[in-house]
């Protein structure tokens, strides 16, 4: 039995200790090789082979994501991201740093050995690192899915000793590295539960144990049938009204006349309409995500019917800020973002293509088409000065993500508007890309970020497109944007309910 490791880099005082540990590791391998593992012969070698090149874990991620719940999709993505980091670390640092030979297979029954023996060095076990990374990454996002994946990951790690591919210490080191990779990924990209605020202004809202008094208006175009069916199962006395997009506002107005709680299910534009009607009638709002992005619902902590039903049954709600803009003697509200410049054009392109190729693909295609156009910057006047700009982004609350994209908010009642600008000098594509990948947007020649309570823009040409919560309208002259603090009551489950 060989457990050879290059010890030339180890100080002399530590070589004897390391040799004894390696010898003990080799003896443990011998015990495992000679031991009878009931039922393992037909399972573990096949399981070990299925994990080659991460095939098993990519298949598992696909199966998890196919359940089509937001948390499951995030768990699948986090698991694969953790696996990728672990695999990269093993192959670039681990196996090149410790040149340990593979075990000699004399004591391993031929029926248990792999048909194709690995040729890389033994320490650490890449299969074990990938298995542990995937399972830990999934579990950090979704403990339930993590519990389902963990036995498979444990079996893959065990199979590496069973088939004679690794010593036990290789497997333990690989597993530790994999778990560490999952936590590094969580540090870089916090889980949704970790990113949720620890406190918000809680609000008094009706507790509806069976949903009686809740009238939920659902936009059929958003594909909400499964979601509202699940909500009705959880709250059987809730009234569900499904309608076409052009009927949403009228149905919301009618629902508000008979509801104790106004509910809305659809994309961000549909939710915006629901919020406007709820504010008009002084009703609390119950939001069930039903669109592509669902920024507002997710920032409330509502991911599915189960989470919303739990909040409605318990009367759990929060006070949230609402953005308001006034233009051309009319006012509208926004829950997420408002934009001028390039972004409204992108929204129009996305809406044009999304029925044919889907929301995400339409967004990418729209960005390519918009950025390829020859254009002049939008010119606005603010604080008495004229400013050329490619894009103006205004968020209802401060978004955590750097760059221009609307990432996540950790508070929905923080007070300021999150204003981000890409200045209109130079090439628009380069400016926008530079701003999108920038770190925290500080003032520079290309872009800037500032937090304001109110913003007044003037000098807008007639027909200037303005996008808010995924909807596009045209404005001219002067636009005033302000914050209405803690004006809307919205159901939001406590973190331990989601």
Image: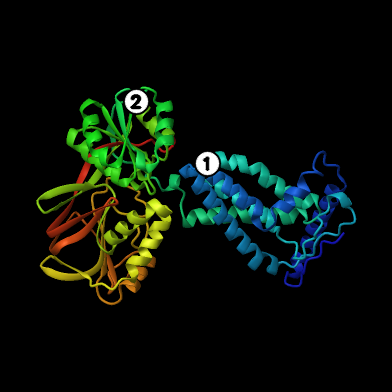
**How dense is the environment of label 1, judged by Cα within 10 Å: few (below 14), some, or many (20 and up)?**
few
Q: Residue 32 at what x, y percent from top left?
A: 83, 48
**How dense is the environment of label 2, judged by Cα within 10 Å: few (below 14), some, or many (20 and up)?**
many
Q: Residue 250 at what x, y percent from top left?
A: 22, 36
Front residue of 279 and 19:
279
Q: Quadrant of the C terminus?
A: top left
- What colour scheme does the image use? rainbow
Q: Which mark is residue 204?
A: none
Say which residue appears at 33% left-offset and 54% top-offset: 351
Secondary structure, mark 2, is: loop
Report which residue position mark 2 lands on: 238
Q: Is residue 439 visible?
A: no
* Residue 214: quadrant of the picture: top left
Front residue of 123 and 248:
248
Q: Is residue 328 visible?
A: yes
Front residue of 252 and 280:
252
Say which residue appears at 37% left-offset and 56% top-offset: 353
306 sits left or right of 267 in the view: right
Report which residue position mark 1 lands on: 67
In the orientation shown, which residue stands out farthest toward the right? 106
Does 466 sit above or below residue 63? below
Label 1 and label 2: CA atoms lie apart by 25 Å
Q: Residue 285 at what x, y percent from top left?
A: 28, 35
Q: Do the numbered discs 1 and 2 sit on residues whose CB atoms are within 8 Å?
A: no
In the orientation shown, which residue stands out farthest toward the bottom? 426
Does 381 sit above or below residue 298? below
Say which residue appears at 74% left-offset and 68% top-offset: 99
> Which numbered disc, 1 or 2, marks the residue that appears first in the sequence?
1
* Residue 490: quadrant of the picture: top left
Q: Residue 252 at what x, y percent from top left?
A: 24, 34
Secondary structure, mark 1, is: loop
């Amino acid at each position: 039995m060989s457990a050879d490791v290059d010890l030339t880099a180890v100080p002399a005082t530590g070589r004897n200790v390391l040799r004894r540990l390696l010898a003990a590791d080799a003896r443990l391998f011998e015990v495992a090789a000679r031991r009878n593992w009931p039922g393992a012969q037909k399972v573990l070698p096949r399981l070990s082979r299925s994990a080659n090149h991460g095939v098993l874990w990519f298949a598992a991620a696909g199966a998890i994501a196919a359940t089509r719940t937001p948390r499951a999709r995030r768990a699948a993505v986090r698991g694969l991201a953790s696996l990728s980091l672990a695999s990269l670390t093993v192959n670039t640092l681990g196996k090149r740093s410790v040149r340990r030979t593979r075990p000699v297979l004399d004591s391993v029954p031929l029926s248990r050995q792999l048909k194709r023996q690995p040729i890389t060095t033994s320490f650490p076990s890449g299969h074990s690192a990938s298995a542990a990374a995937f399972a830990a990454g999934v579990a950090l996002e979704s403990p339930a899915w993590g519990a389902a994946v963990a036995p498979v990951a444990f079996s893959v790690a065990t199979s590496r000793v069973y088939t004679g591919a690794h010593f036990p210490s290789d497997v333990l080191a690989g597993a530790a590295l994999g778990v560490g990779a999952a936590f590094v990924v969580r540090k870089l990209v916090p889980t949704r539960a970790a990113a949720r605020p620890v406190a918000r202004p809680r609000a008094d809202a009706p507790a509806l144990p069976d949903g009686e008094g809740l009238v939920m208006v659902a936009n059929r175009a958003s594909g909400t049938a499964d979601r509202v069916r699940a909500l009705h199962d959880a709250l059987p006395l809730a009234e569900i009204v499904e309608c076409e997009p052009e009927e949403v506002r009228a149905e919301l107005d009618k629902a508000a006349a008979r509801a104790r709680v106004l509910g809305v299910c659809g994309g961000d534009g549909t939710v915006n309409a629901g919020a406007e009607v709820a504010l008009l009638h002084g009703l609390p709002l119950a939001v069930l995500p039903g669109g592509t992005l669902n920024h507002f619902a997710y920032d409330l902590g509502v991911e599915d019917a189960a989470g919303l039903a739990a909040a409605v049954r318990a009367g759990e709600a929060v006070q949230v800020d609402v953005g308001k803009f006034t233009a051309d003697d009319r006012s509208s509200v926004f829950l997420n973002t408002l934009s001028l410049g390039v972004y409204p054009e992108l929204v129009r392109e996305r809406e044009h293509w999304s029925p044919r190729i889907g929301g995400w693909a339409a967004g990418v295609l729209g960005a390519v088409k918009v950025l390829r156009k020859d254009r002049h910057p939008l010119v606005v006047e603010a604080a008495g000065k004229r400013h050329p700009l490619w894009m103006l982004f205004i968020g209802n609350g401060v978004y955590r993500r750097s760059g221009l994209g609307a990432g996540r908010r950790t508070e929905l009642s923080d007070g300021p508007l999150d204003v981000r600008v890409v200045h209109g000098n130079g090439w628009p594509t380069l400016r926008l890309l530079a701003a999108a990948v920038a770190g925290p947007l500080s003032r520079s020649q290309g872009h800037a970020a500032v937090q304001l309570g109110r913003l007044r823009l003037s000098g807008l040409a007639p027909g200037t497109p303005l996008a808010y919560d995924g909807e596009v309208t045209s404005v001219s002259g002067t636009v005033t944007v302000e914050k209405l603090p803690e004006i809307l009551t919205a159901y939001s489950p406590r973190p331990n309910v989601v």
